[in-house]
Amino acid sequence: MSAPADANSRPSPRPSPRREEILAATVRYVADRNVSDLSLRPLAAEIGSSPRVLLYLFGSKEQLVREVLAVGRAEQLALLERSEVEGGSARETLELLWEWLTKPEHRGALRLFFEGYVRAFGHDGPWQGFGTTSLDEWLPPLGRVLEGTGANPTVVLAVLRGLLLDLLTDTDTDGGTGSDGDNSGTDGGNGSGSHAERVHAAWCAFLDATLP
């Protein structure tokens, strides 16, 4: 799915299958790196292109970064909207969303999102408006999910993102839920267990308090 059009995700003047292929390869490339350190020459060498082709297709490195960030936002928003469709109650929907967001294969996308979010503080260029745009995208569907529960979508989103960021600080694990697939943790949030288990338990405790 596509993110709403804005300054960070304006349509390409040169749409083509090759352009989409290179954009997807770039998203994979930066998932394990810092997008703010992106350099066209090593990127081109890694994905089988050239700096000249990248500049022809995207116009500038800044525009390429904008579109990479837009893809990252769109991937997260797609998971929220998929949870909204496939979930049941508000709690079941948020549990499903958490399960998908914390899968190891989404760790790179989370890193990309939070890097863009932090870089947007006081910066212009490709990061300008990234944080506010992501809020504008997330709050309406989250409000629909929480309708009638009394829960505040802004608070729920803040807790969700805060705990996801805490999960990313654990460099010793893949952020997953353990071999048995249980993401509820084993310690009830009392400080024992692994870092990942404590974060998962904190999310469950928040849902218990917010959506009993």
Image: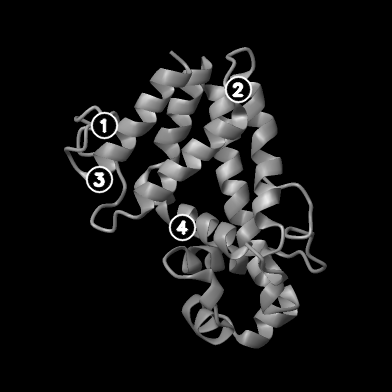
- Contact (CB < 8 A) between labels 3 and 2? no
Q: x and y percent of residue 204 in the render?
A: 36, 26
- Who's the residue at 30% across and 31% down the image? 201
- Rounded to the nearest angstrom, the CA distance separating label 3 from label 1 is 10 Å
Q: Which residue is mark 1?
A: 189
Left or right placement of residue 182 versus residue 164 in this view: left
- Label 2 is placed on what type of residue? Val
- Rounded to the nearest angstrom, the CA distance separating label 4 from label 1 is 24 Å
Q: Residues within 10 Å of mark 4 (few under 14, many from 20)?
A: many
Q: x and y percent of residue 19 in the render?
A: 67, 68
Q: Which residue is mark 4?
A: 111
Given this view, does label 3 or label 2 mark the residue nearer the observer?
3
Q: Which mark is residue 145?
A: 2
Q: Is residue 187 above or below residue 37?
A: above
Residue at the right extreme?
Answer: 13
* Mark 3 vs 4, N-terminal side: 4
- Who's the residue at 29% across and 52% down the image? 174
Q: Secondary structure at mark 4?
A: helix
Q: Residues within 10 Å of mark 1 (few under 14, many from 20)?
A: some
Residue at the left extreme?
Answer: 192
Left or right placement of residue 179 versus residue 209 in this view: left
Q: Secondary structure at mark 2?
A: helix
Q: x and y percent of residue 74 in the render?
A: 62, 48
- Rounded to the nearest angstrom, the CA distance separating label 3 from label 2 is 29 Å
